[in-house]
Image (spheres, rainbow, N blue to C red):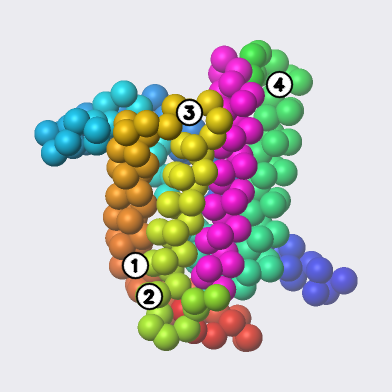
Amino acid sequence: MTRFLTALVRLILPVIALCAVFLLSFHLRDVPVPELHALRDIDPLLDPSGWINWSFLVFPLLFFVLNLSSRRYGAALTLTAALLTWIALGGGIFWAMREGFIADFEQEIAPYAVAASFAGAVAVAQLVNILLFDWLRGIPWWKAPFFAAFVGGLVFAVVFNTRPAMVWDAELGGRIAVEAAIHFTWALGQLLPTALLRRTIRPLPGFGGA
């Protein structure tokens, strides 16, 4: 019982942080990023003006949170935190619909097919991120957080953007390239806060390395 309660307490902060990332990303889904429209000057296929928003720029925070949780608690507890986050979000949406705060899911959240594709892509990306971090953790310390964040983000971009409803053409390739660049930049940038937090967020016994 003591071990169960300890694990439960350890899950609180990762679950709250993961939920916060999802909610922030959803809140910013309609906020444009005109600064990135300049990418069309490099190549018209990279023009993100038709789809980019701040949601895409904050979403990689998800992998930063997962990395910190994996560093501290290991893969098993982090996977549990990811699962509980989905349960919390699903429960919250169900409650909001029942209470009338969400009148029409497809109008206020997303079409069911898109929502299902998004959830599936994120779940796969989370799994890849957590397992890759666990596999790579060690020396040098930066290897696990960098590759786990980048590959996890890349997996999400590819899986979500190649869902059946998407048209597989050159524009899709350009979109994936832009999203991959965003995740690469985040993976590189998050190494600084990760380095600063290494003394604060130390691995529990049995989880050495990164």
Mark pair 1, 3: CA separation: 33 Å
Mark pair 2, 1: CA separation: 7 Å
Q: Is residue 15 above or below residue 142?
A: above
Helix, strand or loop status at disc 2: loop
Residue 72 visible (yes or no): no
Residue 122: within the magenta? yes
Residue picked out by circle 1: 191
Q: Which residue is at a point 64% across and 24% down the rendered structure image?
A: 112
Describe residue 102's horizontal placement relative to residue 152 as left or right. right
Kind of residue indicated by mark 3: Met
Residues tagged 3 and 4 counted as in contact (Cβ below 8 A): no
Q: Which residue is at a point 74% across and 70% down the rendered structure image?
A: 6
The residue mark sitting in front, 4 or 2, is: 2
Residues tagged 2 and 1 counted as in contact (Cβ below 8 A): yes
* Dominant secondary structure (helix, strand or loop) of the stretch shown in magenta: helix
Residues in magenta? Answer: 106-134
Mark pair 3, 4: CA separation: 28 Å
Residue picked out by circle 2: 142
Residue 188 in picture, x, y percent from top left: 31, 62
Q: Is residue 184 above or below residue 168?
A: below
Residue picked out by circle 4: 97
Given the current orientation, which residue lies at the most extreme left position? 41
Badge 1: residue crowd in 10 Å (few <14, some 14–19, many ≥20) = some
Mark pair 2, 3: CA separation: 35 Å
Residue 113 in picture, x, y percent from top left: 62, 26
* Nearer to me, 7 or 135: 135
Mark pair 4, 2: CA separation: 43 Å
Residue picked out by circle 3: 166
Residue 82: within the magenta? no
